Image: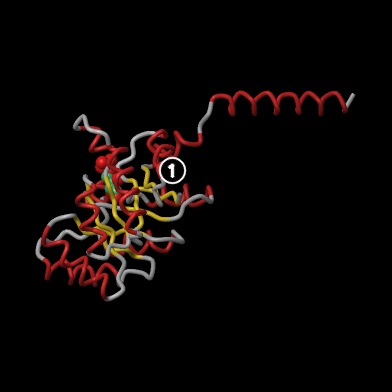
Amino acid sequence: MKLFLDTGNLDHIRTINDWGVLSGVTTNPSLIFKEKPKDWIAHAKEICSIVDGPVSLETTTTTTKELIEEGHELAAVAPNAVVKIAMVPYGLGAVKALSKEGIKVNVTLVFSPAQAILAAEAGAYIVSPFLGRVDDIASDGLNVLADIVSIYDTHEYETQVLAASLRHPMHVVDSAKIGADIASLPYEVFEMLVKHPLTDAGLEKFLSDWESLQGQSKK
Ligand code: E4P
């Protein structure tokens, strides 16, 4: 399962990229709003230049015609740009048209297997079910993910399943067990993923024993 970072923050992207585990980035208008870039397209270009993998850039227009135009503009940002389009009726026509032209589209704000079938039929490159937001309304995001993975396997859809809106390490582990192609996680969840108290305690002991050994061999 590939790991993507869900952010618009350039420093966070550089940090996780330096870990050597970053396969892509997802952004959305709320994440970009937090960064307040003066020039959104220049900011998107910068993100695409840091990451060696797909970078999803979200559309904000509200008709099929505008989405197609905006999709062209976003796809031209960089060769690794992926156009993100919300799962709405007027979005599906744009997904179809852009996909037909060979432009990669990530269908976002997906909350049900029914919506995921529509995304795949429209030719999406990626479908993004939002696990955390499903959990927030006392439903089960992992069940939605499992249904989508199973339906896609049965019908051999090529659309990649990206587990989105992940809130904690077990969302990531369970998404991998279920068979998601990609998990996109916030910076804080990457930090949680790497941490284990036994690793910290074990390393502290190894380093202190090593230091003692250096002290002894000097005697
Ligand atoms: C994914 O593409 C979305 O940007 C993201 O995962 C949304 O997460 P949130 O529900 O934490 O805002």
Q: Which residue is at 87% across, 27% downward?
A: 217
Outermost residue toward the right? 219
The answer to which image quadrant residue 58 occupies is bottom left
Q: Is residue 71 left or right of residue 204?
A: left
Q: Is residue 25 left or right of residue 137?
A: right
Q: Position of residue 62 (x, y in %)?
A: 10, 61
Outermost residue toward the front? 154
Inspect the image, locate mark 1, and give the three-letter code of the amino acid beneath it.
Ala
Location of the C terminus by quadrant is top right
Q: Is residue 147 above or below residue 170?
A: below
Ligand 1 within 8 A of label 1's CB? Answer: no
Ligand 1's quadrant = top left
The answer to which of 216 and 62 lies nearer the viewer is: 62
Q: Which residue is mark 1?
A: 176
The answer to which of 133 and 32 lies nearer the viewer is: 133
> Which secondary structure lies at badge 1?
helix
Q: Which residue is at 23% across, 62% downward?
A: 121
How are the residues colored? secondary structure
Q: Position of residue 86 (x, y in %)?
A: 19, 55
Q: Position of residue 91 (x, y in %)?
A: 15, 61
Crowding around mark 1 (Cα neighbors within 10 Å: few <14, some 14 to 19, many 20+) is some
Outermost residue toward the bottom? 101
Q: Which residue is at 36% across, 69% downward?
A: 78
Q: Which residue is at 58% across, 24% downward?
A: 198
Q: Is residue 48 above or below residue 111?
A: below
The answer to which of 200 and 169 lies nearer the viewer is: 169
Please give the count of numbered marks on the rendered protein.
Answer: 1
The answer to which image quadrant residue 173 occupies is top left
Q: Position of residue 168 (x, y in %)?
A: 38, 33
